Amino acid sequence: RLERIDLSYNLIPVLTFDITFGTKKVKFLNISHNSINDIRKFVTGNLTALEVLDLSNNKLTNLNDPDAPFNLPENLTNLYLQNNGIFRIDYEKIEALKNLKEVNLENNQLLHLNKSLIDAIKRGISVRFEGNPLTCNCEIRALKHFITEQPSPLEQYSNLVCNQPKRIAEMTLGEIDDQELTCSETEKSEIGLELLTHDYEPLPDLRFREIF
């Protein structure tokens, strides 16, 4: 039975439905280092046995197109999307994968780490996000709180470099004071902040971890 396919380092421009023929048992698919800029509808979701999907080093941009949804098989454990030009992706689909262990989104054009992705991080999924033009506003405050509360440093998150707003550009998330992670009323409305938890509120200046 065919369980591994390696099509890396070719000149594939489009991932079509043809790849699903005879690949229902495939667990490992490497299509990295191609020229893929389009994934046709239902292709990835139909690779039902897939556990590892490597689409890194391609030319992907919009993975949240309603006309061509980027669906993911439920057995997926590792997803590699680094070194593309991705500016839009449905984080909720990633967070919904119950077996996922690792997702690499490094070196794309993603602006936000939203609640779904932060919830995935809290669940123990390793998320690589370095090299994106990150906006550090109140939306990322829950991640700041999470890394602050850990007994040992989580450097892959605390070392994330902020790109916006300008007053904290080039600073890492670990360096920035919680109070600096603010949102305008417009941003709060867009994010739906009124529906989020206390994790998105500034931390008090003094916190008692234990009371005896």
Image (spheres, helix red, strand yellow):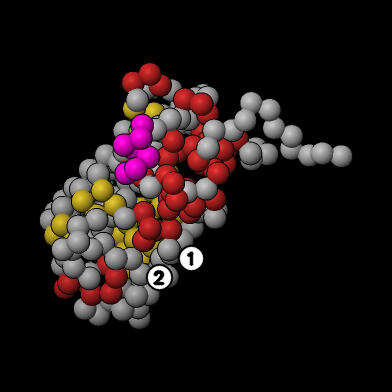
Query: Of residues 7 and 90, which is closer to you in this image?
Result: 90
Q: Is residue 75 above or below residue 197?
A: below
Q: Is residue 132 visible?
A: no
Type of amino acid at the residue the image marks with label 1 = Asn
> Horizontal and vertical percent for residue 151?
68, 39
Q: In 3D space, how far apart are the residues under numbered discs 2 and 1 (Cα atoms)?
A: 7 Å
Query: Of residues 10 and 193, which is closer to you in this image?
Result: 193
Left-right relation of 209 to 99: right
Q: Is residue 150 visible?
A: yes
Query: Which residue is labeled 1 in the image?
Result: 99
Specify start and end residues of the magenta stretch as a single range: 184-190
> Horizontal and vertical percent for residue 133?
31, 33
Secondary structure beneath disc 1?
loop
Image quadrant for the C terminus? top right
> Horizontal and vertical percent for residue 47?
30, 73
Q: Residues within 10 Å of mark 1 (few under 14, many from 20)?
A: some
Dominant secondary-structure state across the stretch colored magenta: helix
Residue that appears at 48% across and 54% down: 120
Secondary structure beneath disc 2?
loop
Type of amino acid at the residue the image marks with label 2 = Glu
Residue that appears at 36% across and 54% down: 91
The part of the image, by quadrant, that contains residue 7 is: bottom left
The part of the image, by quadrant, that contains residue 202 is: top right
Taking the magenta stretch, the answer to whether it contains residue 120 is no
- Compare marks 2 and 1 and give the one earlier in the sequence: 2
Residue that appears at 34% across and 75% down: 48
Check residue 74 in the rendering and tell me which mark sits there, or answer none: 2
Residue that appears at 49% across and 58% down: 101
Left-right relation of 168 to 109: right
Left-right relation of 15 to 4: left
